[in-house]
Image (spheres, rainbow, N blue to C red):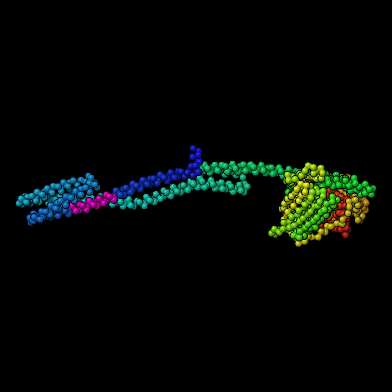
Amino acid sequence: MTQWRKIFSKLGFQSIVPPLALLLVATLAFGWLAIRLTTHFSNLQTHISRTTEANESLIRVTLLRSQVKEALLLYEATGRSELLSQIKMLESERAGESAHLKNLITSIEPDVLHLEAFFAGTRESLGLRQKALAALANGQRNRARELIESFLILYRINSARMEDLHGFLKSQLTASEAEMSQLLDSLPYFIISLLLIEALGAYFIITRHRRRVLQPLNLIHNGLGKVARGNLGEPVPVTDAPTEIREMMEDFNAMTMALERTTRELDLARSRAERAARVKSEFLSNMSHEIRTPLNVIVGIADILGEKMASLGVTKEVNVLAKSSRMLVNIVNDILDYSRLESGRTSLAKAPFDLRSAIKEVASVLESLAREKGLNVKIDIDPSVPRFIVGDEFRLEQVLLNLINNAVKFTDKGEVVIHAKCEKRGALSLLTIKVSDTGIGISPENVSRIFSRFEQAEASTIRRFGGTGLGLAIVKQIVNLFGGEITVDSKLGHGTTFSVSMPVQAADAAPVSTDAAPEIPGTLQSPQLNAPARILLADDSSDNRFLIRAYLKNSPVEIIEAQNGQQALDHYKTAPFDAVLMDIQMPVKDGYDATREIRAWESEHGRNVTPIIALTAFSLPEEIERCREAGCTSTMIKPIRKQDLIMTLNRFFSRAKPGLTAESPTEV
Ligand code: ADP
């Protein structure tokens, strides 16, 4: 039953049955009326034609009567025998015509009063005529005269009756014709009302169809538009509509509700994930800060010990300590870097740089390590590679450093080849750099895992080669940021080729770096400040203050210490300094506020701008930007190496000596 209803509804009958039924009734009624009308019309036509015929017959009978009468009177007067046969012939003709007339009139109106009287009169007058003829034949002229007199009287009476009959037929004809013309007059009204009713029916069907089908469909259409614009909260009002459309509206509402629920859940999940990512990022940042602070001391002390022990010839243990602490720094950097890349908070720099020398520089950094292992490092740069491109030099070098470092690390004999080429792709060029080695290779089942974070091809790798399994994950993220892709082709025991392809834009030339600082070769040398200086050192950690003091021990410096930002500010106001080393995380007043207030004080008192070097354990770019905004001239990220500190200070002193003013811009 339901099935039938559905089919019925699908065909659209449900909505148009009432108007269709109405139309059908109207059509049937009009059909019946039309048949009735046609029948009536044809009856009227028959009636009219019969009446006309009867009228004609009556005229003929009248004529024959008068001819018979004339012939009888002539015969009486002349006695010509041929008149007798003429009378007989006219008589029989009249009899036939009279019978025909009678039939016609009876078919028109069976109960015509004058008819019987007329025919009775006719019969009587025939009898009188025949008697008169017989009397004439017998020579009884007087008797014949009397009979003819009687005949003539009856003739006049019958003529009057015929007049009545004629009047009757005439009235019949007039009535029929009037009825006929009335019928013909009403025909246009009939047709117009038929058309009107049909049009009304059609209009009714269309309106109903629109209300029950088109309007609900329109509502669904509007609803879809709202969903497309992301407005899921408004259900479509379920209106009076055929079952299928109503079900469609209900399904649509159920779907949007489910969609809204899912979207809400997704939003919730996203905000949770974002919060989790933020918490993770803050945690990593804080952890990095917490690890870097003691690491700063370890790395620094290792450097200082290295210097001291070098003179005593004990370097191996100190070197191991220094190397381990530097490895720890690298791990912390990698974790932080990966977390930043993963959360999508890293953007690429866009500046022209020398691509060819970048590749060569990275290779040269690792060349000594390769040489130690007896490996040959080959660089093959195709002429198609442009010298200058626009992009992020640091990140490209980071990718190459990771790949070449791995190639050297996982190869015991043979060579490491770096091959670069470029192909034109419209306005851009596709740069492909391949790093191939003849090392241990990677098994096919492990190839897919190595780009995942903390994944290493073999469990034994970590024991033999060390590493965190983060390098390639970082490389992949960076290559993706470049809009490129990284693939690997490897054969276990025979070697590996990593291939990086990315779109690059060639540049005319790279700006000459103005930041080049004099190199201080070797970590175990003892670099010093070039000129005597007065330095304000603000750090809440006594270990860090001790370390900086130790770094600058052999330099001609006077160091004034402060344990927080407020103390630093107070000291600064008392006497001029050549530089301020400002830790950022400090109690009472942090490094940002202290720097801001120093800059404000300098400006207020028209004092020279003293270089303020921020020392921070937070390495995020936003932290560095915050330091710059607070007024720091430069930022150094912990752990701080002795040579880096002295290099930075020397750079500022050589620049600052002519005297900076408060209006001079600070170095970024
Ligand atoms: P890590 O080297 O710190 O362990 P990576 O992410 O750089 O982390 O590398 C992940 C793993 O991929 C490595 O542990 C190693 O198993 C494999 N791998 C990477 N490069 C090579 C290579 N050139 N030859 C062989 N194996 C490699």
Q: In this view, does 662 lie above or below 262?
A: below
Spot occupied by residue 187 in the image (x, y as percentages of width and height)? 35, 51
As for residue 53 lying within the magenta part, the answer is: yes
List the single residue furthest toward the top. 1
Relative placement, left or right, of 317 versus 620 is right
Magenta: main secondary structure: helix
Quarter the C terminus occupies = bottom right
List the single residue furthest toward the bottom. 508
Q: What stretch is highlighted in magenta?
A: 44-61
Observer-nearest residue: 583 or 68? 68
Relative placement, left or right, of 141 versus 503 is left
Q: Is residue 381 above or below residue 329?
A: below
Residue drawn at x 15%, y 48% is 122
As for residue 398 lying within the magenta part, the answer is: no
Spot occupied by residue 593 in the image (x, y as percentages of width and height)? 82, 49
Observer-nearest residue: 274 or 606? 274
Spot occupied by residue 300 in the image (x, y as percentages of width and height)? 88, 47
Residue drawn at x 75%, y 51% is 498
Residue drawn at x 19%, y 53% is 60
Spot occupied by residue 620 in the image (x, y as percentages of width and height)? 79, 49
Residue 490 seen anywhere in this rendered image of the structure: yes
